[in-house]
Image (cartoon, grey):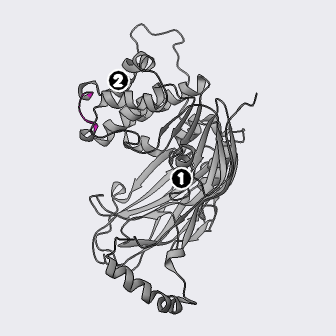
């Protein structure tokens, strides 16, 4: 008997974009259209038709998922991840290719999927169970666990249309995870919940995997993907770019977009977000000799230099930040200019800044740099370029020659060590 729970073969999905919406016409309008149609077709000859413009949200996607496996699906916004899950859930039909799914599927694709807004939380639990093919007695057995996990017992008999997005997610995840689907599909909905609930959900998904059920997990949280998944699929522009160990695929994902360069032109860089009232134009990594460089040793000085230009925000005050994260997506720091006593009171036509980290004590790994500029109150983001640069810490440098495994930690610290005269535990609780 095959141990494959999901088999995807050359799956493709095409959408038509920009097509005008048809409207109902009167008899007179229809007759006029019929007489004018030949002349209209002649005028259109040789001209591109916007009605025929199409895009491939997915193109020739193939992979297998074994029973009991937790597979991460990662990629930039618009890569096709959600389209893939919608096809696997049979919400959308593929244009080409096919997917074989062996087992009962529970899904959590977006806030409110599968819930009827007019029904109460209690009624929606039974509705979702019925959709999964469960008997009422089976749902009754799991009901108390679902309510306890969701932590919304007080609002259980309230119509879900009055729930906040966080309450929606709590109940939706509790239902999807506890009604014992053999395959669980989870999209980026956990970002809506608070940090404690996200941790609780990750723990539950780990438990689901231990029980031998299959999980497909779509997320932009690389730390969660690395913690939960054994393998990952990288999707870009609707195509599979890599399938394999989660460490390798996450590294490749974070390295896309020019992050393997020591100097980068940011004028046409993506991914980025913001109002673009101020934009970053370039960024560079430099060593202590001001040379462009992306490989360093523990204890080296690293400078991150960058330039930015206002579009319609000249002579105004802004806040700037530099963010660092590890290769598995853990956010290390958010270094804001004002915290170091530096402020840009009046932004000129062009601005170039440099941030220097001295005696850097990170363990050997690849670290990714993001840049942010926004309003002084941080309520507006003008430009946020993500993972535009990366640097590597390759060895212990002047501090140590011993082998430093990547998983040993984040910080290489050399505190003061000394002997104490007293070698037995002190009665007073104090050491000399």
Q: Is residue 194 in view from this perspective? A: no
Which region of the structure is painted magenta? 156-160
User: Closer to the camera, 214 or 420?
Assistant: 214
Left or right: where 151 falls relative to 264? left
Q: Residue furthest right?
A: 1
User: Closer to the camera, 309 or 235?
Assistant: 235
Total marks in image: 2
- The relative height of residue 177 versus residue 287 in the rendered view (above or below) is above
Residue at (54% x, 46% y) in the render:
85
Which residue has dot 1 on it? 83
User: Closer to the camera, 307 or 8?
Assistant: 8
Whether residue 244 is in magenta: the answer is no
Tell me which label, 2 or 1, sits earlier in the chain: 1
Q: Quadrant of the N terminus?
A: top right
Residue at (24% x, 25% y) in the render:
154
User: Closer to the camera, 152 or 15?
Assistant: 15
Asked if the residue under mark 1 is in contact with the one under mark 2, i.e. CB atoms within 8 Å, the reply is no
Q: Is residue 193 in view from this perspective? A: yes
| Principal secondary structure, stretch drawn in magenta | loop
Residue at (58% x, 90% y) in the render:
46
Which residue has dot 2 on it? 147
- The relative height of residue 363 versus residue 381 in the rendered view (above or below) is above
């Amino acid at each position: 008997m095959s141990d494959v729970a999901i088999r995807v073969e050359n799956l493709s999905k095409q959408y038509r974009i920009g097509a005008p919406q048809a409207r109902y016409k009167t008899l007179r309008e229809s007759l006029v259209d019929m007489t004018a149609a030949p002349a209209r077709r002649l005028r259109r000859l040789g001209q591109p038709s916007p009605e025929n413009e199409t895009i491939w949200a997915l193109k020739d996607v193939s992979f297998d998922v074994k029973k009991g496996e937790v597979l991460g699906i990662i990629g930039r916004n618009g890569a096709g991840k959600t389209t893939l899950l919608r096809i696997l859930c049979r919400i959308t039909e593929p244009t080409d290719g096919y997917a074989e799914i062996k087992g009962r599927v529970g899904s959590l694709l977006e806030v409110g999927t599968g819930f009827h807004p007019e029904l109460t939380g209690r009624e929606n639990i039974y509705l979702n169970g019925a959709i999964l093919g469960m008997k009422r007695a089976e749902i009754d057995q799991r009901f108390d666990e679902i309510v306890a996990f969701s932590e919304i017992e007080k609002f259980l008999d309230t119509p879900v249309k009055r729930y906040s997005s966080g309450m929606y997610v709590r109940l939706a995840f509790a239902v999807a995870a506890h009604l014992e689907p053999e395959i669980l599909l989870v999209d980026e909905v956990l970002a809506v919940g608070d940090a404690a609930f996200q941790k609780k959900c990750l723990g539950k998904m780990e438990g689901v995997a231990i029980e031998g059920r299959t999980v497909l997990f779509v997320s932009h949280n690389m730390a969660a993907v690395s913690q939960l998944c054994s393998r990952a699929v990288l999707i870009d522009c609707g195509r599979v770019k890599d399938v394999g160990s989660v460490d390798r695929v996450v590294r490749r994902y974070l390295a896309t977009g020019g992050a393997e360069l020591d100097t980068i032109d940011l004028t046409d860089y993506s991914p980025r977000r913001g109002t673009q009232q101020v934009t970053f134009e370039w960024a560079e990594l430099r060593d202590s000799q001001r040379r462009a460089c992306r490989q360093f040793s523990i204890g080296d000085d690293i400078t991150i230099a960058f330039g930015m230009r206002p579009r319609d925000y000249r002579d105004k005050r802004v806040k700037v930040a530099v963010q660092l994260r590890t290769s598995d997506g853990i956010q290390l720091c958010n270094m804001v200019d004002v915290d170091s006593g530096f402020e840009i009171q009046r932004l000129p036509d062009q601005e170039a800044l440099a941030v220097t980290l001295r005696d850097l004590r990170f363990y050997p790994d690849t670290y990714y740099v993001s840049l942010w500029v926004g309003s002084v109150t941080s309520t507006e983001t003008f430009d946020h370029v993500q993972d535009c640069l990366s640097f590597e810490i390759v060895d212990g440098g002047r501090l140590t020659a011993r082998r430093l495994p990547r998983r040993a930690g984040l910080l290489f610290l050399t505190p003061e060590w000394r002997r104490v005269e007293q070698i037995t535990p002190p009665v007073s609780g104090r050491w000399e």
